[in-house]
Image (cartoon, rainbow, N blue to C red):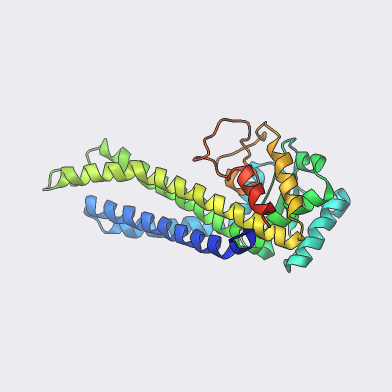
Amino acid sequence: MATLYTQQSKNVGRTWILMSVFFVIVIGIGFFFSQYYGDPNILYFFVAFSILMNITSYWYSDKIALAVNHAKQIKEVDNQELWHIVENLSIAAGLPIPKLYIIDDPAPNAFATGRNKEHAVVAVTTGLLSILEKSELEGVIAHELSHIGNRDILLSTVVVVLVGFISILANIFLRSMFFGRGRDNESGGGVMMLIGIILAILAPIVSTLIQLAISRKREFLADASGALLTRYPDGLANALIKISKYKRPMKYANDATAHLFISNPFSGKKVSNLMSTHPPVEARVKALLEK
């Protein structure tokens, strides 16, 4: 019977499959645009532009995420217990010790970001520090370090960029309709336009759903890896239960970075399970406590 420990390799494989689907969507939409407008240079332009966006996000995604969430860097003297927990678990995981940040927010939450393990960051809220016991805080930190070790922090950045890029492509196409551009007067032009409109409407929806699916897989995988790191799944399970009981959103909750957090930063707002960036807490706790 599969447990949380046997799900890790499966989740990694599924995540990369979903990432491949993203690239196919980008290339497909770019190809359609080049055919519709009769200009192959359009495809080359958007491929180049997507690469540029990925490079930019690779270098600056962590700074953007930290700034958006008003995180402030701390040193060992600022919170020795937190510092030592991160230090000890990083050594146990074989990871460089990440920079530590605190977010002044009563909502209990945490996230990890950065382009690789050498430039990683872990941020926690003041609310998280105030409600968790040491074993529970260790579970949360192990979860975030697992995101770093599993290279989720870079993967999530790429996903955000691709979702945004697909939305931009769809928006450009729909706006261009109002100016009568494209091969409308040629044979089959009307059919091409109809197909284009359908793709432009469905592409952002599909890409967002894929983004949500990837986020959910990442959380299950980080839960499993974190439990293996601490050897105490109950710590993280109890932490998730406590975090889920807080029913107010974070002060600076943002759609662009919501999936980075261990728990949905919009907690308290009515969001369907389908559109939530995080799997239900009950499912995560059940997976952690399976023997």
Total marks shown come to 0
Q: Nearer the viewer, residue 140 or 203?
A: 140
x then y, percent, for residue 254: 59, 39
Task: Quadrant for the C terminus, please.
Answer: bottom right
Is residue 69 shown above or below 9?
A: above
Left or right? Give the position of 170 relative to 219.
left
In the orientation shown, which residue stands out farthest toward the bottom? 94
Write the residue at 55% across / 58% down: 155
Write the residue at 55% across / 50% down: 215
**Residue 74 visible in image:** no
Is residue 247 shown above or below 132?
A: above
Q: Nearer the viewer, residue 103 or 226?
A: 226
Left or right? Give the position of 179 relative to 219.
left
Task: Quadrant for the N terminus, please.
Answer: bottom right
Write the residue at 40% across / 44% down: 204
Q: Nearer the viewer, residue 158 or 134?
A: 134
